[in-house]
Image: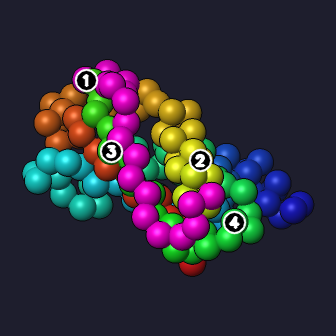
């Protein structure tokens, strides 16, 4: 751990990025899709949203059947990046108890990350609706 501390002391931005990446690898993965067909994969807006949510995405380890569970959270955003209305959660695969735990963890991550900042207002039509896909790391 001393090496990690030295890394974050010398380059805080790189150190934090590594810690976030490690957390995502250990806890699971998050991907973002815009509801609009004009959204391009791998765009910086989707990356910003994914990174914001990934910081908070974690669930209890050892959940039975977690590898089979997939959670999708569909949400609408205001121009200021705030969630409008109630996000829609869809869960597939795995045991019911694990589905519930992972769906709750996904919702917590989304709500903690909101409001989403630094989104390009001139591209609002591409990010006004997004779907976030959550899955455990395999």
Residue drawn at x 28%, y 45% as measured from the top left: 130
Of the 4 image quadrants, the one containing the C terminus is bottom right
Mark 4 in CB contact with mark 2 (< 8 angstroms) = no
Residue linked to disc 2: 105
- Residues at marks 2 and 1, CA–CA distance in whole angstroms: 26 Å
Going by the image, does 7 lie left or right of 87? right
Q: Earlier in the sequence, mark 1 or mark 3?
A: 3
Residue drawn at x 51%, y 41% as measured from the top left: 107
Which numbered disc covers residue 63? 4
Residue drawn at x 79%, y 60% as measured from the top left: 4
Residue linked to disc 3: 74
Quadrant in the rendering for residue 33: bottom left
Residue linked to disc 1: 79
**Mark 3 element type:** strand
Q: How is the image coloured?
A: rainbow
Q: Earlier in the sequence, mark 2 or mark 1?
A: 1
Q: Badge 2 local density, few (<14 within 10 Å), some, or many (20+)? A: some
| Highlighted range, magenta | 79-97
Mark 1 in CB contact with mark 3 (< 8 angstroms) = no
- Residue 34 seen in render: yes
In the rendered image, residue 50, in percent from the top left (x then y), is placed at: 43, 50
Mark 2 in CB contact with mark 1 (< 8 angstroms) = no
In the rendered image, residue 112, in percent from the top left (x then y), is placed at: 56, 33
């Amino acid at each position: 751990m001393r090496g990690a501390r030295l890394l974050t002391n010398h380059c805080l931005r790189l150190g934090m990025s590594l810690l976030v990446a490690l957390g995502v690898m250990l806890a699971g993965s998050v991907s973002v899709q815009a509801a609009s067909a004009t959204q391009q994969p791998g765009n910086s807006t989707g990356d910003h949203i994914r990174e914001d949510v990934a910081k908070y995405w974690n669930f209890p380890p050892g959940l039975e059947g977690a590898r089979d569970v997939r959670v999708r959270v569909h949400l609408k955003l205001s121009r200021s990046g705030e969630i409008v209305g109630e996000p829609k959660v869809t869960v597939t695969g795995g045991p019911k108890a694990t589905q519930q735990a992972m769906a709750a963890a996904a919702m917590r991550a989304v709500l903690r990350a909101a409001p989403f900042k630094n989104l390009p207002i001139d591209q609002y039509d591409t990010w006004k609706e997004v779907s976030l896909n959550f899955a455990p790391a395999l």
